[in-house]
Structure formats: C-alpha cells, structure tokens
Amino acid sequence: MTDSSHTLWHGRFAGGPSEALMAYTASLPFDQRLWPQDVAGSKAHVRGLLRAGLLTESETHKIIAALDQVADEMSSGTFIFADSDEDIHTAVERRVTEIAGDAGAKMHTSRSRNDQVATDLRLWCKTALLEIARAVHGLQEVLLAQALAHRSVYLPGYTHLQRAQPVLLAHHLLAHGWALGRDVDRLLDTLVRLDVSPLGAGALAGTSLGIDPAATAADLGFASVFHNSLDAVGDRDFVAEALFDLSVIGVHLSRIGEEWVLWTSEEFGFASLDDAYATGSSMLPQKKNPDIAELARGKAGRLIGNLVGLLTTLKGLPLAYNRDLQEDKEPLFDSVDQVALAVTAISGMIATARFHADRMQSAADAEVTSATDIAEWLVRGGTPFRQAHAIVGALVRAHLAEGTSLRSLVNAELGSEAAALVAPGVGVALRSSPGGAGPGPFEAQLRSFTELLTTQRQRLGL
Ligand code: ARG
C-alpha cells in the first residue's frame, strides 16, 4: 500500500492505493510519450487561468518555468518518475508542484484529466497523422519514379490471378499510387475533424470558474473548440477514425506486399530485391526472402485488430468519461508506429528493387492474352461481341488442345490482320480507352497523378 497523500485524490481517501490497483490501472508505461503535448496543453491552460484572474503573473511564470524544466528533464531523460505517477498527467503535475510549490498546486484549477487527456491525444494525432500522410506521399513518389523509369515495360494484368490482358508496368504501379492518394486524403479529412479543442470541458460539465475554452483552443493552435462538454471528454471518434485510416493503409500495403512476394518468387521472377531490403535463411544458404513484403501483408491483421478492439471498447459506454477510454492509446500508438515503419520499409524496398522486363513481357506475350483483342477486332468488323467471344474462345480451345500456335489458327480462320494482334508487344498498345492500361491513356493519367501529388504536397506542407 502506498501513502494516500501521493494521489491526486487523497483528500477523500483514508488509505492509499494497492499495488494491484496501480499495476492494473496505471497508463504511464504507454502514455509517457504524450509529455510534449501535456506540457503544451498545461502551458495554454495556465495562460488561460491568468487571463481568468485565477493565477497571478508571478504564479503563471513560476508554473511555466517549471513546465519548461519538466520538458528539459523529459527530453534529456533525467525526469525521475515516482511510484505514484499513474499517468503522464499525474507525473507532470507532481513535478511542477515540486518545483513551483504553491503556484504549481494551482495548475489543475478548472481542469480534469478527462479534458486534459483528450486534448493531449488530439494534439498528438495532429502531428502523428500528418507525418504518416507525408510518408504515404513519399511512397507515392517512389511508385511514380519507378513508373517513369520503366515507361515502356508491360506485364500481364491479372484477374483471379490468371493472366488476363497486358498492361503497362507504370499503369500497374500507379494503381497503388491512386489508392495511397485516397489514404492521404482520408488522413487529411480526419485531421480536419479532430482539430477541435476539448480543453475547458473539465471532468464532464465545465466549471464555475470563468475560463475561456475558445482562447485556450486558439493558443494551442486548434481550429475550433468543443460545443458540448460531455461530448468533448467522452468522444474518441477521432481515434477510431485514425485507426480506420491506418487500417486501410495497412490493407493497401498488404496487397502491395503480397504482390512483391509473388513477383520476387522464382515462379514469377518479375523483380528482385536489393540485398538491403531482403533477408536470408539461417539454414538454407541459397535463400533470399521478401520479409518486408510478408510483414506488410501480415501486420494488416494487427492494424485491423487495433481498430476493432477500440470500437468494441467504445460500444455501449455511457457518457461521459469512463476509464475504459484509457484503452484508446495503445492501439493508436501501435498502429501509428507500425504504419510508419511499414511505409518506410516498403518505400525503400520498391525504390531499390530491380524489375525484370524480360520476364514480365514474355509472360504478357503468351498468345492467349490477345484473345480479347481478336474478339474486339471482330466487333470492329460488325460481329456482335457475344459471337466474337465464342469464335475466339473456340480458337483458344483448339490452341490449348492441339498445341498449334494461336497465331497460326487465327491466321487460318480470320486472316493476317487478326493474326498480327497475337504478335508480342502488340496488345498493350491497344488498351487505348481513357484510364486504360496502354501508353496512350497513360500520358493523361500521368498528368492527373502528377497534379494530385502537387496538390498533396501543398496540403501536406511539403
Ligand atoms: N490515464 C487516463 C486515460 O488515459 C487519464 C484520465 C484519467 N481520468 C480519470 N478520471 N481517472 O484515460
């Protein structure tokens, strides 16, 4: 049992908290990283107390100086945590009171840890999600650079993982680029919605002391301020939304990861990884493994788990603050950390990889990938598509059954103009409709994608 005088609530309690309670309820091990936000929020709060006449100039200066000292100790690693520090807010307030004495004891006037933690976490998200969005933008740039470096290379496009039609590699790479573009957009939208200060909501209902939450919101750089104190302290939509955004990024990275697992396999042989972005085997000397790609695929499960876990925590919670809400931080921090690591690793992996145009193109040049082009040639000559489909389907069946080349079968049945469509490298150029996979529409796509990246750079402050 620790001494009750060390808790923030000691007045009401005759005895101190048990070790079991502290061990189970403390959040310090994971919320320590909020100290910069806790210090910033506390400074804005005390400036608000000064404006409200609840602190004198000298008290305010003392507290601000103590908060600066806390920041120095935290950043230099010399801050000594006490056993009674159950969370970062308690630790900061305790230390400020040690340094600033009676003035420090006034810092928590008109404030609860409920509005404090919500403020800290929103401030943290503002920085963290912007950094993630910038990193995702960086991955889009990598995809664009590789697309531009391999402008004329083509590979089979797949449906059901069966070869379908040839597509430009650049088109394929930018397909991921557009998905990541939506991820950046989503993060920016989330950032707008979470940019609301909860500070001044108190424990749940505001306070009788004349404070001005709008002024503290402005001081902290929030775009707006809460309208309802219960909502301000009870809402964790912004965390759920961040976890959703991060999960979608994780899902996108998992699809990219799966693709690279396939592409770097001997069976596909479409690409090989730089040694710096591959791993070896402890037993099998010949192995070169795509572990980054596999973990990008695997960790998506954990990101989705973090989202589902938090939503489950929130479900059915009564207004306003409940300690359950402390469960918001670990999934959020984990998802942000994991996505940051993943985006960096995948970006490096793709930036340094080698693409094997010969393997990609010879796979795309398999005669059957021209089947649709022959059917469309028939359509141009007036044959209804369904009949054209059946005619070419029968030719493909004969080709597969007899082993005769499709080109000679088409030549015999439909003539040389149709047979020319089966020749290597012809098909990709025929994907000419807007947004299609051939070189013609790719030019327009490239312009749009470049515009998207330019707009994003402005929005991301890059
Ligand atoms: N560590 C707590 C959390 O993360 C801070 C708020 C505690 N509030 C309270 N009334 N016990 O949610």
Image: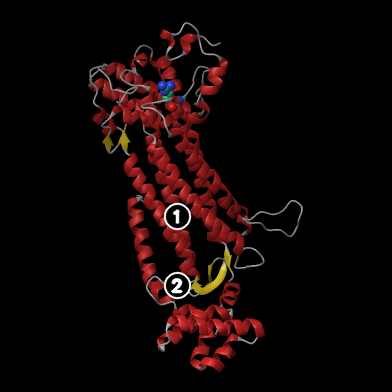
Residue appearing at x 45%, y 82% in the figure = 376
Q: Which picture quadrant has residue 105?
A: top left
Residue 315 seen from this side: yes
Name the residue nearer the viewer: 296 or 346: 296
Vertical arrangement, residue 359 with respect to residue 77, above or below: below
Residue appearing at x 42%, y 32% in the figure = 316
Percent x, y for residue 187?
Answer: 39, 47
Q: How far apart in space, not on screen, are marks 2 and 1 (Cα)?
A: 24 Å
Q: Quadrant of ligand 1?
A: top left
Vertical arrangement, residue 95 with respect to residue 283, above or below: above
As shown in the figure, which amino acid type bears the numbered disc 2?
Ala
Going from N to C along the chain, the mark reached first, 2 or 1, is 1
Secondary structure category for the residue under label 2: loop
Q: Residue furthest top?
A: 14
Q: Which is closer to the viewer, label 2 or label 1? A: 2
Q: Quadrant of the N terminus?
A: top right
As shown in the figure, which amino acid type bears the numbered disc 1?
Gly
Labelled pair 2, 1 in contact (Cβ < 8 Å): no
Report the residue marked by disc 2.
437
Vertical arrangement, residue 63 with respect to residue 247, above or below: above
Name the residue nearer the viewer: 397 or 100: 397
Residue appearing at x 59%, y 74% in the figure = 363
Question: Badge 1 local density, few (<14 within 10 Å), some, or many (20+)?
Answer: some
Percent x, y for residue 200?
Answer: 29, 25
Q: Judge from the rendering whether residue 434 lies leftward or rightward of residue 276; answer left or right.
A: left
Report the residue marked by disc 1.
138
Vertical arrangement, residue 42 with respect to residue 417, above or below: above
